[in-house]
Image: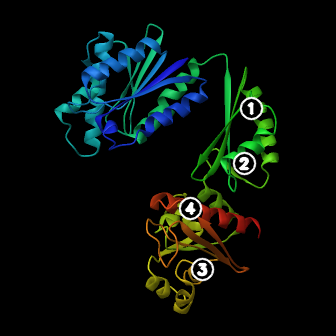
Amino acid sequence: MKAEIVSVGTELLLGEVSDTNAGYLASQLVLLGTEVHFITAVDDSMDRLGEVLGRAWARSDLVLVTGGLGPTQDDLTREAVACLLGEEMQVSPPLLQNLRDMFAAIGRTMSDSNIKQATLIPSAQSIPNPRGTAPGWWVERNGRLLITLPGPPQEMQRMWQVEVLPRLQALSQGQALVLRTLKCSGLTEAEAGEMAGGAGDWSNPSLGIYARADGIHLRMIARAASQDEAASMIAAAEARIRAALAGHIWGSDEDSPEAAVGRLLTERGLTLATMESCTGGLLGSLITDVPGSSAYYRGGLVAYSSEVKVAFGVEPRLIEQHGAVSREAAEAMAEAARRRLGADVGLSTTGVAGPEGAEGKAPGLAFIAVSDALGCEAVEGRYPPLRFDMKRRVAIQALFLLRRRLLAR
């Protein structure tokens, strides 16, 4: 099946909003064995939207459209699909009642402009959207499928996973696919590629290698006549990669560094505290993104200035002698966080986020330290001096240092 994705919204072309929906849907279609040949973004223009949809409908078996399902005059996806198919939109009484009930449940009166969200054409079936007011459309005609999905990612992803994907899976026949992603750290993309590439033939399962913020991802896709056969192929391929990259793989599939660290802390019955300088609280934010992190995370201190570091327990003479961005400062911060917050383990970050240098040190320099009852360990790193990128990379490397320390206990 040949697929095409159309993202609708002037805000996408102005750069006000990033189009994450297209990437999400493309990655999902891979699992169906569906090839995505085109991804198009178009503004809220009836003429241009009609042109894009007409081209997609003519050349693709499956067209996924995200956005343009709102209640305002510039939300034109329904109208463009109706025009494309030469059908007339009609208000569906059940959909209209659902909308009225939804607004009543939150104590608000529905505007007349919302009525357009309760319309259908004869070729369309409504797709429920409990997270918003915009139902989708499932359109089947002439052996083709056109599916409209809401623009907000949280609404779109729920509709895809619960309503759309199961129906598409039921239509897929003749080939089973199994996908597995292994995640590693401590290697460059080229190094991981060479090590994994030497582990055997990668025609099926296929192997893709990608650099991500949390390390290198190795994605395997097996295709076979049955799900069991594809799963067996993936298991054998995974064993080959794990043997080739032994010691570097830290997780798989939906694993995150913060979740991996959280599991280790929980298994060992340990608590954690942080003190951050250059990451500005991002490390603590990542840690608390994990459900249940309150069981092991005592809290975090954001000590962006030297004065605050001293106030939280770092010796002033140490900063005077070595600087706030130093191995010694990082170790003292980790120890101070551990003692100040009564945790088993302390983790710290300090660095020069840039673009200017500080203390005579170049932007991109960072130190990370971990402290526990067995002592303190610190590492030095140099990162591209782009503030947001550096903050995220330092925070992730701090989690990797903590993971390594916990595994060594």
Name the residue carrying label 1: 231
Crowdedness of circle 1 by 10 Å Cα count: few (<14), some, many (20+)?
many
Q: Amino acid at mark 1?
A: Ala
x and y percent of residue 367 in the render? 59, 72
Q: Amino acid at mark 4?
A: Tyr
- Describe the element under mark 4 as helix, strand or loop: loop
Q: What residue is shown with label 3? A: 338
Q: Gap in Å between the C-alphas at discs 3 and 2? A: 36 Å
Q: Is residue 237 above or below residue 263?
A: above
- At mark 2, the secondary structure is helix
State the CA–CA distance, disc 4 to disc 1: 39 Å
Instruction: Residue under label 4, please give it.
Output: 383
Instruction: Give the CA separation, mark 4 to mark 3.
Output: 26 Å
| Residues at marks 4 and 2, CA–CA distance in whole angstroms | 19 Å
Residue type pointed to by label 2: Glu
Tell us which disc is closer to us: 1 or 2: 2
Q: Quadrant of residue 317?
A: bottom right
Who comes first in sequence, dot 3 or dot 2? 2
Is residue 220 toward the left or the right of residue 214 in the image? right
Q: From the image, which quarter does the N terminus lie in?
A: top right
Is residue 250 left or right of 391 when viewed as pictured? right
Q: Marks 4 and 2: CB-CB under 8 Å? A: no
Name the secondary structure under disc 1. Answer: helix
- Where's residue 184, x and y in %? 69, 51
Q: Earlier in the sequence, mark 4 or mark 2?
A: 2
Is there any visible trace of residue 116 in the rendered image?
A: yes
On residue 191, the disc is 2
